[in-house]
Amino acid sequence: VPPPIPPPVVATVVRAIGPVRVAPRGSLSHAIATGDTLTAGVVVETMAGGRVSFQLPGGTFVRIDSGSRAVVETASRIGLERGRVYIDRTGDARTSVVEVSTQWGVVRDIGTQFEVAAAGPGVEVRVREGQVQIDGPHVSESLRRGESLRIEGPGRLIRATVATHGQEWSWTESLASPFTIEGASLERFLNWAARERGLTWQFRDAATRREAAAVVLHGSIDGLTPSEALDAVLSTCGMTYRVLDDRLVVTLASGTRR
Amino acid sequence: MTRCILAVAILSVIGPALPVSVAAQQRADRFAGRPVADVLRELQEKGAPIIFSDRLVGPNLRVKAEPRRTSGMRELAEDILAPHGLALANGPRGSWLVVRASKSPAPEPDRSKPLPQADPGTPPRSPVRIEENVEVMDRAGDVARSPNVYTVAAAKVAETAGGLENVFQSLPGLPGIAATKDHDGTFSVRGGGPEHNSVLFEGVQIHRPQRIASDLAGQQSFVNPATVESLAVDASGLDARYGGRLSSATLFETRNGSTGRRLAVSGSAGLTSGDVLLEGRLPHTTTGSWWATVRGTYYKVVADRFKDGDIPSFLDFQFKVAVKPSSNTSLSLVGLTGGETMVRPILSPPDQRQSLAGDNLREFHGNTQLAIAKLQWTPGPRVSTTTTVNAYTNMTRTQDASIDWKTGVPFDRRIEVDDVGAHQRLSVAWSSGVVLDAGAELHRIRSSWAMQALSLVPSRSIGPDTLGRRIEYDGPIDARLVRTAVGAWVQQSLPIPGVVVVEPGVRVDWNTWTDETAVQPRLRLTRTIGRRSVLWGGLAWQAQTPGFETMQHGIPYYDLAGPLASDVRNEQMRQVVVGLDRMLPSAMTIRVEAYHRRFERLLVQRVETAFERQQRLALYDLPPDMPPDSAILEFRPTVDPESVGEGRASGLEVLLDRNRGRVTGWISYTLSKSDRELFGRTVPFDFERRHALTLAVNVILTSKVRASVRSQHASGFPITPLHEEVVFNDDPNRFPGPPPGTLYRPARRADGSLFMHTGLYDEPRISLLNSTRVAAYGRTDVRITYTIDKRFEAYGEIVNLFDRENFEVVLPDVTGPNGRSVTYRFAPAFPRLLTYGVRFKF
């Protein structure tokens, strides 16, 4: 009798916070840690205070909030049973399409950051960047940046606009994709931090742009959330920032103009 | 040789010290003159959590002098940085940040980089903490958001002109919602009266949500809009979950406190009132949160300017604590306590107050306490439950110092309502699209109504009313009602793939007072058309049990504890609605909804019998030349309740909405018709508005300036015109009434003709009930908000910009061609009103 073929590895845990358990297909559940791999069909369950992010092939990061239960069905499909999952796809849209299946339909990304939340009978999809397509037996909707759709039942669809940043997205920050600042330019760091917070960014004026043009960063922000990293890094550059609507405006701090 | 010996001797003496000196030299070699960045990187490699950039630490920045301290990496780094005006600051999670030292010379420019040009157009900025403005977002809460529900974004409550920080003031202008007065935000929905509206706060019925108010202050409701997460109005009744009222359900959910910070402070300070909101993460938790808010008036120091008018004041305290005991449960506690007063002082000197009792012409006192505990449990992915227990109490007392000529005592009314209840809700998603929503609730409601005399202000009531007018007292009223009410509902969604979603449901209510089981079927059909349209329709049967808690919002007074109260039945309404919601380009949505309602068994005042009429008229010396159609000769309404009223309402509502972009807002139009069968005739409903048009626009003008305009225009309400009547209350007939053996005698002129009078205090004729209309309503409000910085913003608002006299009518006397008219304001209305204030957030 040939040995059973093990399920393929489909994801690598990037960060695990608090109690997170996984149950590979046909096995008992166990805790996981950063660097572990996940096989197809694994059930991921986060307890209170537990969160996890993992990376799929092609550069897509999946973040799962506390109190969630999801199945990593394949390298491109997550089944959400309850809780919240956040998809951040940075790879090529032609090779790394990701789907989140829910009881009301499948949420398919078209180059984006988005969140799917399932609580009780309802499912809510919020798009932070790009576009998603939701298809199901009773729903066929397309959402763009800043839009949400709540599905409370067949035909009971509530579209609304949502902010792309702020408190409601804050849980995703603790699972932000890693970024190495050593040797990185300030602009590259701002691209990362602003995207993690759902913001666009700009320099306030030409003087700030000139000052920032060649700034190189040193050190490490491992363990910091994007907001914390933003606070820390900009202060080492003699700069500060404000959030105006959905824009992060970077400016020279008082007394650092030359 | 001697020199060599001497040198060896010296070396032998200093030999033990040599390694130290060499080590010191080596250290000097390691730091002095080296690039600071290199030293910092070495320290990083040894584990120092330093973060720096080459803007402040450029490659040419050199260590100026040997560090004084070498015992620790931090001290060493600080010593190296200090000569350059740099320092180590504590960063997040133990990191060390290389920053400019405060009160230090400017850092030495890094010559390796070209000097940037100064930007003369940019003024120096004041130092501010790096902190994000966290805006309250409109997100889906527990409020039912069916397509038939109108939702209002919480942030729009404060932003919309004329909102006055009152969640209820933001609702008029939505289709089908007509404000019955300006000040306190009470409204009528689709042919139902204010007493037919339900207000649910966290799912709990609030029996008196509005606050008494005047032009001066008090326009706020019981809830601080800064704590509201979602606000919606459901006038369709298609959800079986909502019951107990005929006309509409206004649904509030409060938000949880911010968990991002330990303590955040926000609030506002207006012309006459202000509020402070504290919130944060609950200690020793990661997801627990709390908020507490205090609101109140503080204008009494300047109230002398206004003391010829009503002076309201209030003070509220509210709080919410939310925790997640486990991954699938959440528990919240909400509490509220508040008091309010309204006083209108008497300005006359004491010797001119013979007919007045007390120092204040009118006084109002009210207080409310509310406690809600809610436990939500999601045991599985397809099941969720919510358990709510609540206790609510409200008391209001209204006093009028004027002494009525008939009763001889001043007006005094005290209404109390206590409601203790428990609710249980269960939602089960059997499979994709098949969802069961079921629940039950139990209430113990105690209400009381104590009243004597009448408030001497004009009234539009046709019969005895809630301010004591037209009541034939045989002593003070002291009535109490206690009832236990039980309700249960179930509604199931059944999708027929590709065709329609059918949601049949039923709600059953029973109470110990009417001892009547009200079975209320509900049905909603929903069809999604393409990707942009939703079509829905439905039927709803609704029932409402009368009580003092609802009677206080209406005009007529009913003796609900009297001998005929046992015949009172539940009021009923049947409704059919159909609507279409379609998304348009440019983030716009259009919604069209049509409805027809039929009211049955409405509470009405029983008309007196022929014997009762004869007894009443027996007190009068009716002259032979008295006009036969005089009001007192009609069969007049009594305080006895009868469940025989009927009514109808039909309407078409259109809402064009844009909720995204720099310009947001809505345009709504309502065409409606509603009437009542009253006293044997069909008359327009008191708050019928044939046409209503509202435009509300919010514009982001610049990054600092936002503007809002709301303009409401509507047909006038029906009202009863005046007719001259014979005057009977001449001086000899004053309290305690005609002397024994005598009658109310008619007054006559010197020429012997009857003295006829057209007065607002006289009984209106039933034959003229609601046969004319007041002038059209029109009000335009504007608001400007200026963002000072991330912590402060200032706002200014002009309510009723064009100073239109709303709710004021030149009431015609239809007696004849020579009849006069009386100008009458039948409901409080805003004059042109300027208000301004500051909001803050820390």
Image: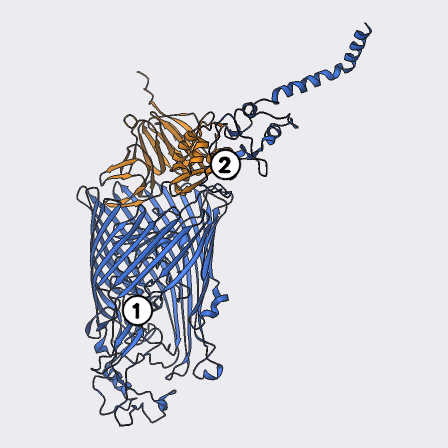
Total labels: the figure holds: 2
Of all residues, the one furthest to the right in this rendering is B2
Front position in the image: B506 or B114: B114
SS class, disc 1: loop
> Quarter-wise, where is residue B622 in the image?
bottom left
SS class, disc 2: loop
Which residue is the site of mark 1?
B807
- Chain A, which colour? orange
Q: Disc 2 and disc 1: Cα gap in Å? A: 60 Å
Relative image position of residue A125 (x, y in whole percent): 31, 40
Front position in the image: B132 or B39: B39
Which residue is the site of mark 2?
A257
- In the rendered view, tell whether residue B646 sits above or below residue A156: below
Q: Amino acid at mark 1?
A: Phe
Q: Is residue B323 left or right of residue B433?
A: right
Q: Which mark is residue B671?
A: none
- In the rendered view, tell whether residue B797 sits above or below residue A198: below
Relative image position of residue B49 (x, y in whole percent): 54, 29
- In the rendered view, tell whether residue A10 sits above or below residue B9: below
Q: Is residue A255 left or right of residue B67?
A: left
Tell me which chain the residue with mark 1 is part of. B
Relative image position of residue B21 (x, y in whole percent): 70, 18
Q: Amino acid at mark 2?
A: Arg
